[in-house]
Amino acid sequence: MTKGPGAESAWRGWRAATEDALYGPGGFYRRPEGPAGHFRTSVHASPLFAGAVARLLCRVDEALGRPERLDFADLGAGRGELVTGVLAALPAEVVARTRAYAVELADRPADLDERIDWRDELPDTITGLLFANEWLDNVPVDVAETDPAGVPRAVLVAPDGTERLGEPLEGPAADWLARWWPLPAEPGARAEIGLPRDLAWAAAVRRVARGLAVAVDYTHALGARPLFGTLTGFREGRETTPVPDGTCDITAHVALDACAVAGSAQENTAGAAPRLLTQRDALRALDVTGARPPLTLATTDPAGYVRALARAGEAAELTATGGLGDFGWLLQPVGTDQAPL
């Protein structure tokens, strides 16, 4: 650990430091360019992603018996790109019954579709689909590291990004680590303590009266956690050292298996089994396959062939091994036994 300059009070856990850096006054996520100015998500990669989510919403609608009002809540909405694309892709009959929510701390974009309800928290009750795309990875977490004696300790960080070890872990954080990310005795081994994400996901799921809650994020599983953690930063499209000063995104992969257990512990999900799958499998089940168009189309409809070829390339990016296709999808059904995927 490098001990940085500054007063003793400048040292904080990564969770508190990240909270201010991302969401405080002048924080990274309050900047006018939004996340799209710094990194590319599946939403920005292709409109096929929003189209797939729209098809998922239609399947939820069918499972719920086509209610008079169908909710779609985009949690961590960025600048409203996903919810805008979903509304554009829905059949007219479904759009007429859909109430669309964009949940984000930043101010409402000036040119956003007036049909979208922009707010800083979820509605009290959702009947339909709650979709959290790359939201949980930006729920701030503390970091633990094994010291030379083999004891897991909190990692403290200064405003310039330098770190040092704090006190040994205890209480709920230590309990979470022991269950979901046991650290080896090897000095320098690191983990992100995902308890705040479990709690955030459970709170989101409780808002769903009937329907489906979906979390999409880079993930890892118990037994295969990375030895040195995943905390990193992004700025202007490039991965960078995480510094909690508001100039970069600070993110870490999500233990979706722990979130699944937390979601299933809620009263409204009793008896409903969550499902974890890759984005590759989820999108293929939603008809995003990446299959190339037949060559004969190039002769009969050259323009159509070019469009179909472009769509195939976009689908391939969304489902690529080693890329976006490796994202995890956590599906948490509420009040229905019908599996939309």
Image (spheres, grey):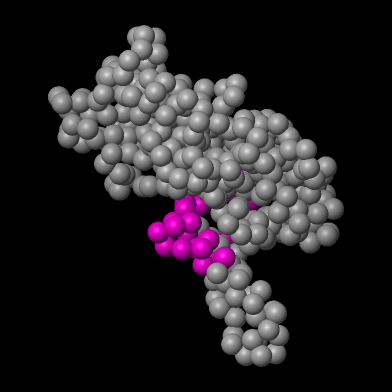
Q: Is residue 339 left or right of residue 247?
A: right
Q: Which residue is situated farthest in the left direction here?
A: 149
Residue 210 pos. (x, y %): 67, 45
State the extent of the magenta-drawn residues as a range: 314-341
Up-down relation of residue 144 to residue 43 (above or below): above
Q: Is any part of residue 330 visible from this angle?
A: no
Above or below 187: residue 132: below
Number of marks drawn: 0
Find out whether residue 140 is within the magenta segment: no
Q: Which residue appears at 69% of the width and 79% of the height?
A: 304
Residue 20 in sight here? yes
Task: Tell me residue 258's x, y (percent).
Answer: 42, 40
Residue 64: x and y, percent? Answer: 71, 53
Q: Residue at x 61, y 70 (%)?
A: 311
Residue 288 figure quarter: bottom right
- Front residue of 301 and 70: 301
- Give coordinates of residue 193: x percent, y percent: 38, 31
Give the quarter of the figure containing the N terminus: top left
Q: Nearer the viewer, residue 83 or 168?
A: 83
Name the residue: 66% across, 90% down. 299
Is residue 280 toward the left or the right of residue 71 in the image? left
In which quadrant of the rendered image does the C terminus lie? bottom right
The residue lying toward the viewer, choosing from 4 and 136, is 4
